[in-house]
Image: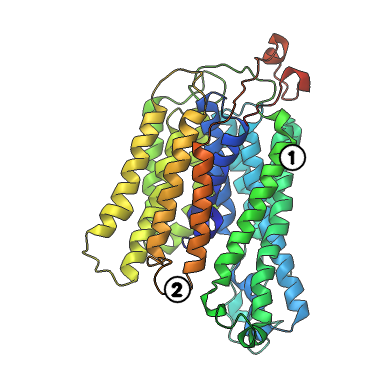
Amino acid sequence: MGWGIRGQYGHETGAMIAGVLLALVLALLFCPGVPAARVARAVAWGTLAMGIGGSMTYGQTIGLTQDPAMVGNWAALRWGMLGLAVKGAIWIGFAGALLGMALSGCEYRWREVVGLMLTLLVVCFVGIRLLNEPYDPANRTLPPIYFSADWRWLPDAALKPRREVWGGLLVALLTLLAYLAWRRDALGLRLGLWGLAGGAVGFPLGQAAQGWAGWNSEVLKAGALRELLPLINWWNFMETIFGAVIGTALGLGLWLNRARIFEGTPQTMPAVTGARVNEAALPGWLEGILLAIHVALLVAAEFLAVCWFSAVYGFGLVMVTVPLVAVAGGRWWPYLVVLPLVMLPIAGKTVIAVVELGTPADAGWPWVFCFVLPLALTSIASFRFGRPADPTRPAEWFLRPSLLLLTWLFLGLNFVVFRFPWPWEVWTARTPNALVFALCAVGLTWLALRRGHRTRPPPCSPAAARNSNCRPSAAASPPFTSY
């Protein structure tokens, strides 16, 4: 559901829809009894991490596998699928690694996160120069490894090749995984590898369905599905399949490594930073300053027509740097990221979409129901959850209502963008996807409302709690189980 809805909003902030829903579900399944502040940090990091890969262009890569001019070209199909596997692996690899880092027993203080993100930005720039250059479309000069529209497939076509950045993000991801290995963060490293595998399989698998339809369009028009074919949005179903695969991969990876969730750390602690209490925690006033800076830059990058600014702060690694640091050191930021900050660009893009679909710009209802109401609800919820409270309050206290709230807000906003495709009215190309998303929302609602037997693990041994090593014996930290 999250990845399918992401397709209507696109890029980094759209991908965070899938990130927040996936992180909430995994946290609710695997650690509902852990102190809320610790889990909120993990959900926030998982949300932000899913947005990093949104900087990669992939529309023309998909075109290599299905455009009418490419139908029958097996070499282009293989190259396009390889490109999707590479880009999918990078995209979900970041999501798995950062989610695993936040769920592991390793402590990442905000100063360490600053150094890590600056390093990743530098190596990303180096990777782009090495793997995604030269790029001079005017003279038909493209990188040696290029997965978008290329004159080698259509020598005489008037193409507009897109700039690719997958090489830089690949180098940054490999650097992050090497850092996790050096840091001895087993969960972060393993979940990152599961993300690599899930993305490498999920993107080509989802596109296989859409590509099959493109390659067999004439057969389908004459077959039994000729009445149904115009009602199938193959692109959206490609995204839905991709989302199902990556959710399965990260869920399976976390289940297989569930004994490493918060491994070797005390099970009770004050809910101040979402990690261990330390003198480096950000003061409230600094959290407020960082929030104002990020919101201003995010709004400018998403909604103002300043190309160079959007290219800088709209780049995934840049966009998530301030929030990742603030979440690592702040009390309010984890809840702000999970709720109003992930909702802000989605609500704004929904209003824009409504206006573009023909609603007068001065109409009041899009602003009230698509912007003000979602932001008000999520902001109130974030302040409710972030208030100082019992440090041992279990995470399900905020996981369940957050999952319910975001599920139905995202479904409702997407339903507006889909022009309200009610199933009892004449079906359009949006109706099948809307029904799939509605069924998913019902399933998520059942999960959020279901209350099973929850067990809380005993505290770690004193020796394990004092040990700064992130890999104590498995016996010292039994898995968090829920149902």
Q: CA distance from mark 1 to mark 2?
A: 44 Å
| In this view, 157 is above or below 333 | below
Residue 455 in the figure: left or right of residue 82: left
Secondary element at tag 1 = helix
Residue 460 in the figure: left or right of residue 342: right
| Residue 303 image offset from top left, x and y in percent | 37, 59
| Residue 268 image offset from top left, x and y in percent | 57, 16
Residue 94 has which mark?
none
Q: Say which quarter of the image contains residue 60.
A: bottom right
In the rendered picture of this protein, how many numbered marks are placed on residues? 2
Residue 190 has which mark?
1
**Of pointers 1 and 2, the one earlier in the residue sequence:** 1
| In this view, 49 is above or below 128 | above
Residue drawn at x 37%, y 54% is 347
The front one of 31 and 324 is 31
| Residue 433 image offset from top left, x and y in percent | 51, 64
| Residue 336 image offset from top left, x and y in percent | 42, 37
Residue 427 has which mark?
2
Q: Mark 1 Cα within 10 Å, few/some/many (few <14, many 20+)?
A: many
The C terminus appears in which quarter of the rendering? top right
Visible residue check, residue 432? yes
The front one of 18 and 54 is 18
Residue drawn at x 53%, y 52% is 440
The front one of 309 and 169 is 169
Secondary element at tag 2 = loop
